[in-house]
Amino acid sequence: MVDSGIILHQFEGEITEDILTETLRSVEAMLEEKEEDFKKSRKVYNILVEALQNLFHHTDSQAAEILNNGDQKKTAKFLLAAKNEEYNILVSNYVIKDNIPTLRSKLDKVNSLDKEGLREYYKEVLNNGQYSVHGGGGLGMIDIARKSGNRLNYEFEEVNEDYGLFTLIIKV
Amino acid sequence: MDPIKIEGTPKTPTVIFDGDSGVLEIKGRSIPENAVEFYKPLIDWIGSYVDGAKDNTVVNVQLEYFNTSSSKCILDVFKKLESINGKTSITINWHFEEDDEDMLEAGEDYQAIINIPFKMIEMEEM
């Protein structure tokens, strides 16, 4: 999907709270060592927290089930790669097909906005009084887009009649 | 009233609110998977602080990072403070590290929503 450069970290499997914590810890240590630009390393870390916690919440709420492609439904993928001065973060997980239109329209809206537009949209959602179970309430993708400063690349792949595979690539 | 003191962890900030000094400190990072649980005791505490609140209340926010699960909870803390502003005169000092534009913008976003005076304080290092 993308020529992402040198792979710094990758994971495929079920994301548990322990794996999430350990991944964030090791990526943070690696960024501290590798990235001299403090602003950039902070941005990358921030986006990773958001993207991985998002992945965790999505897959955590799903029941275990083997899909017809042989994958466990709770399987998620994560990859962090660096190319020149740029980082690419890929996250991928299975989503219920019925949820795809909402997710797609959210991402398209985010991608249609410029920096100021994203900021206004963020404030609007921040102050809308709606909460998800874990408190985020729809801010994740807006925050990721704001911090990355780039369009969010995404795709949905057909898996079966109930599920699709969602892949998001964030450039920082 | 007993002060509220929550020790910081790699995922949650240190929170100290001493009713006798009228100073609330939120310091560190706030990236818990579920922030609602974490911030509830503080919001409840602010509710009981209003009786016998100091004339002036200073809120020092010095966060390195926060996730979006924390964003709405931090707004709720500020809204709770806004509801008692008048009974005590509140100032929010929003600290950010030099060049951390994301954190400065985050503070300005709260400032635009909340009717409490904000001071943006740039620090060399957090």
Image: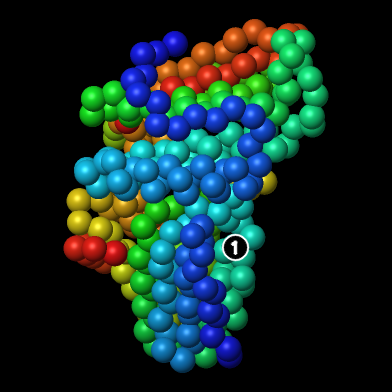
Report the side of B44 relative to A38 (left or right): right
Q: Where is residue A93 in the image (x, y as percent from the top left)?
A: 61, 24
Describe residue B83's horizontal placement relative to residue A12 as left or right: left
Q: Where residue A100 sits in the image (x, y, percent)?
A: 62, 18
At numbered mark 1, what does the secondary structure look like: helix, strand or loop? helix
Q: Where is residue A54 in the image (x, y as percent from the top left)?
A: 56, 37
Q: Which residue is drawn at 61% across and 65% down?
A: B40
The one nearer the camera, A147 or A64, is A64
Q: Is residue A120 above or below residue B101?
A: above
Q: Can residue B47 be seen in this view?
A: no
Other residues around mark 1 within 10 Å, as few (<14) / some (14–19) / many (≥20): some
* Residue A29 in sight from this viewpoint: yes
Chain of the residue on which disc 1 is drawn: B
Task: Locate the C terminus of chain A by quadrant.
Answer: top left
Quarter containing the N terminus of chain A: top left
Q: Name the residue under label 1.
A: B38
Q: Residue at x 80, y 24 (%)?
A: A65
A61 or A125, nearer to the observer = A61
As shown in the figure, which amino acid type bears the numbered disc 1?
Phe
- The residue at 41%/74% (across/down) is B25
